[in-house]
Image (spheres, coloured by chain):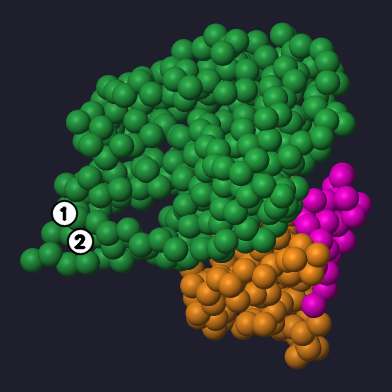
Chain colours: A green, B orange
Amino acid sequence: MSYKIPMGPYHPALEEPYKLDLICEGETVIDAQLHIGFNFRGIEHLAETRNYIQVIALMERVCGICSNIHTLTLCNAMEGLTGLTPPPRAQYIRVIMAELERLHSHVLWAGIAAKLMGFKTMFMTCFELREKVMDVLQAISGNRVNYSMNRIGGVNRDITDPQSILRLVEALELEMGRTVIPIFTTSRTARSRCAGIGVLTTEKAVALGVVGPVARASGLPQDLRRAAPYAAYTEMDFDVPVQPAGDVTARLLVRALEIMESCKILRQALSKLPPGEIATEGEKFVFTTGTATARVEAPRGEVMYSVSWKEGSRNPARVHVRTPTFAVMPAIRWMVKGARLADTPLIQASIDPCYSCTDR
Amino acid sequence: MNLWNKLMCYSRRHSPWLFHMNGGSCNGCDIELIASLTPRYDAEQLGVRLEGSPRHADILCITGPVTHNAVNAIKTVYDQVCGPKAVVAIGSCPATTNVFIDSRTLDGPLNRHVPVDVFVPGCPPRPDAIIQGVAKAAEILAERAAKKLPIAPVVMPLVGPGCEGACPCAATTELKNEEVRA
């Protein structure tokens, strides 16, 4: 006989409010239902009542983990409508911010995954390391979470001393390579807890249209930084890590390898930072009637913004957001089918869900 | 105050256990709350522990601008925390609903639903500020245990660089006027 176990919406294993109904037979999960909407703040509607400066501050607060990515995508879309092109230095600073954010997001995820494995020491180590990333972010932008770096046609703050930031990044890379990566890739505790659970096959991943690290862990080599480069990614040399296995270990490995790739991109961007303006200063711009779309590779996968504007208006006519978790979320159901009940918190966390982005 | 009460006050002040609740937040404050418990800031040296059940907790930490879906849960969880209890509102959202002001899916600010003892402003507040707020709440908790203390909200000062009135969230909240709606 099957029975239903509700998990959430306010549950210690969940960082955010959402509800997972697990239909179980004994200890085995046979089906799952996901309920979201507890964080619904109506941001897309609010965006229609804010002007082109306020909407950036509003969209930064869609998500508290990948806040920079949301403004970057919005600014890319708005630049498509106004015809402004950010100067090369701004493009490089955007890359640097996006990669630093990817670093802190992946380390944060590693910490939370470690906590769910019952590996509390690793959780503390990850968060200590994350503080070092936050130091770099704070040194550049002055803030720890909402950086407010992007604006239409450039960035708000310059990196005045790239060499000092470069030293911080090198120290960070050393630390990552010494502690977090070996523990997650070789530690028997971590491997035995993750191997073979929550499998998403390549066929299923294609059928569900998953994005980001989850797709790359199921053997799909898709990355917008490579497929549709934005900002200054055309000038960067990096690899896209792909793992074929599709289980939680594969997702762990993909993220661990991405941390190292991010450090590589950061080193290149900081050493090649071109001189010049950081924003199109004093240039007048008007919004043309129409819709512009921008896609960016966030730490969790592809973010898409579609911004519509009417000429002469100060407010957008419509801002549509498609977040990576929205694409990855349906995969949870296929991942937990047949899993043991005790593994489900780790499996659902392995997609790195962000329901506050998805609900908005 | 007898010896027993004195002991209880001392214990409560030195081991406040937290229950964290997300009332529709953007995750910014939630992650900063977790960051404040980790080695760099180490709130655990004050005896703070993040608990999984509201029945074990003394201090309720609420983040977010309180969405319609969260109101009932917040009230239920508030009732489940055993007395004496204190409520800390983390971030600008529970205090004023911040940039989400005017949203029709919100039912904030928080003090319309539960009595709040400490407001920690910031978008999000720095971990130092969160620890300061929790320490203040622990003090209130200890006093409340000894005598019936009326609820008078305390607003903590802003901590950290770049927040001397120049915070973008403060500016956006002020900019909410007829001019924008027109």
Asked if B159 appears above or below B63 in the picture, the reply is above
Q: Residue at x 67, y 61 (%)?
A: A49
The disc at residue A30 is 1
Q: Position of residue A212 (x, y in %)?
A: 42, 32
Q: Tell me the subunit letter for badge 1.
A: A
Marks 1 and 2, the one that precedes in the sequence = 2
Number of disc labels: 2
Q: Type of residue at label 1?
A: Ile
Left or right of A339 on screen, residue B65: right
Query: In the image, which residues are magenta?
Result: B153-177
Q: Residue at x 29, y 28 (%)?
A: A218
The disc at residue A23 is 2
Give the quarter of the figure containing the C terminus of chain B.
bottom right
Q: Position of residue A80 (x, y in %)?
A: 62, 33
Q: Residue at x 74, y 13 (%)?
A: A273
Magenta: predominant secondary structure element? Answer: loop
Check residue A136 for magenta coloring: no
Q: Position of residue B96 (x, y in %)?
A: 74, 69
Give the SS element for disc 1. strand
Q: Type of residue at label 2?
A: Ile
* Label 2 crowd (10 A; few <14 / some 14-19 / many >=20): some
Q: Tell me the subunit letter for badge 2.
A: A
Classify residue B174 by image quadrant.
bottom right
